Amino acid sequence: MSTKAGIEILSRKPCAPFYTLLFFLSILCISPVYSLSFHDDIPPAELAAAIEKEMTDEQALAQLFMLGWVGEDPSPLIMEWIRQRGIGGVKIFGWNTTDTQRLARAVGNLQRASLDRQFNIPLLVATDQEGGWIRHIKGDTSETPGNMAIGASGYPRDAYLSGYYIGKELALLGVNMNFAPTVDLFTNRDSSLIGPRAFGSDPVSTGILGAAFVRGQLAAGVIPTAKHYPGHGDTADDSHGRLPRIEISYDTLWNRELIPYRMLVAEGLPAVMSGHLSFPLLESGNAPASLSSWFLRDVLRGRINFNGVVITDDLMMWGARLYLGTVPLTAKQAITAGNDIIMFSDTPALNDQIWTYLVASMRNEEEFRQIVRASTRRVLELKLSYLRGPASVPYIPDPVKVLAQLPDPEGSAFFLNLAARSVTFVKPVPSDSLFPLTRENAGRVLLAGRFSDFFTYGRAAFPGALTYSYTTATNPLNIVSAARNADTIILCLSDSYDLRMLNNLQQLNKRVIVFSVLNPVFIESVPWVTGAVAVYSYAPESFAAGFSAIIGRIPAQGVLPYEQ
């Protein structure tokens, strides 16, 4: 075809269908299809609502799931839950964390899978790093004196810096949410679950220290979560194995257990963990608080005015499962009652009944569907408020920084100072009659206990001291013969077995000093001992501080944070 002929063809008037085609082609060229992204520069509440509106029911429901996995590396199953379902979060447990560099790589792989999906929404990566006794991420992270040590020191700044340095280490690992602080009160002395995890027994002091811890976590970029709502302190039972019953009045609940939550919510607390706890004298009846709309909607949201995200404690715990009998029913009731995130320590099969039952409930029950979508918006708004911007926790951790910066050197110095400030002389013995205990007035010293750091720092304080290391399989009577030739016996007391061992020393009528770690209430059972010093964790810093106080290098300034 000649050029002239071509020009003639182009100059002819096209038919109507040609104009229609040209119109649609122009739209495709100049107006590409737009998809919302987590990183759009839109205010959190507005963008959360827009993304939720575009989501399918399955996408919306998946944001409510927080799952754990078995092993140090992410399992194929947890990766499928992220890639195929788009779950909202993962929970790191102690069995995932012996190697912190490996954990950093695992977190990066989990986040990459999540960020590759539609909307580019990152995961909430959570753990329990309370400090002290509860430290799920081990490896190179700091061992700390813990909450009761903070209560014994009494300084809100100690709570703030504990939250900050713990958060700073978590941020290096890509962990953006911490299930801390624990604001349960030290009410029941026989509690096997709370004990030194509490700041103390006073609700106002607990609220002050808890609020300071929250601010420290936020300064490090980590989302804090107060627990175990409405309070796990007034029971000797452990909700992992049964549903504890706490028989108190509403007036007691409101003016004791709930005071820390009322204070923290007023300070802008972003998240709360609901506990598997029964309060049979209240309107919730025998239901766990974690499954009670009265506790979560009427009291927490309605009366305390909490507007953040509510997360269940692990729904695989028997305290949750026993009430309704099956996990799918429990999961649905948890959402209906007012939890925004349901957490599981195990990874269910991809089409497990938990998932299929909840999806079917959304399709068949419009009210449940709207409840799920309201929770989805809250979860998205939480993420958009805290997981965007230069101050947020990095999605992909840098293993080189992890190697170089864990444990945090400034944090290590602070935690040693906190341990020193919290050391407490418990027995009412005049200091000039017992402490400082020097090498000269101690005579032959026997150190008895089960912790290697106890012996390390004990021998540094008393060179040449005899040692008696035992296990729970040791006959408690054997300590009597080991102690016969000692002038001073220092026994490390941490639990009821140590107490049995200790009581066998009474017959010797010797100078016996208790070195208490964790929960100091056991000291009350041995009024015959010569003296006692309390620290509140088995971190090396705590043993160093305790022996330094015994030999007089530092003063014992701590005060028991509960009434004797």
Image: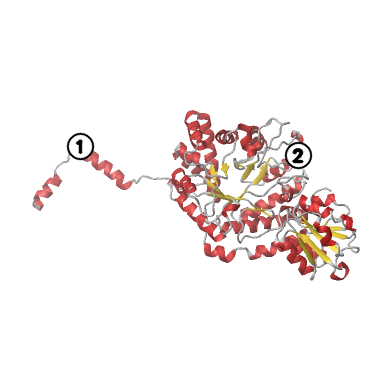
Mark 1 crowdedness (10 Å alpha carbons): few <14, some 14-19, many ≥20: few
Q: Position of residue 181 (x, y in %)?
A: 67, 49
**Between 493 and 536, the one nearer to me in the picture:** 493
- Residue drawn 66% across the image and 45% down it: 227
- Residue drawn 65% across the image and 49% down it: 180
Mark 2 crowdedness (10 Å alpha carbons): few <14, some 14-19, many ≥20: few
Q: Which residue is mark 2?
A: 255
Amino acid under disc 2: Asn
Instruction: Identify the secondary structure beneath mark 2.
Output: helix
**Between 533 and 64, the one nearer to me in the picture:** 533
Render colour scheme: secondary structure
- Left or right of 218? Residue 425 is right
Res 211 visible? yes
Question: Closer to us: mark 1 or mark 2?
Answer: 2
Give the label on residue 16, or none.
Answer: 1
Q: Position of residue 19 (x, y in %)?
A: 22, 40
Q: Position of residue 51 (x, y in %)?
A: 47, 42
- Residue drawn 75% across the image and 66% down it: 457
Mark 1 vs mark 2: which is more N-terminal?
1
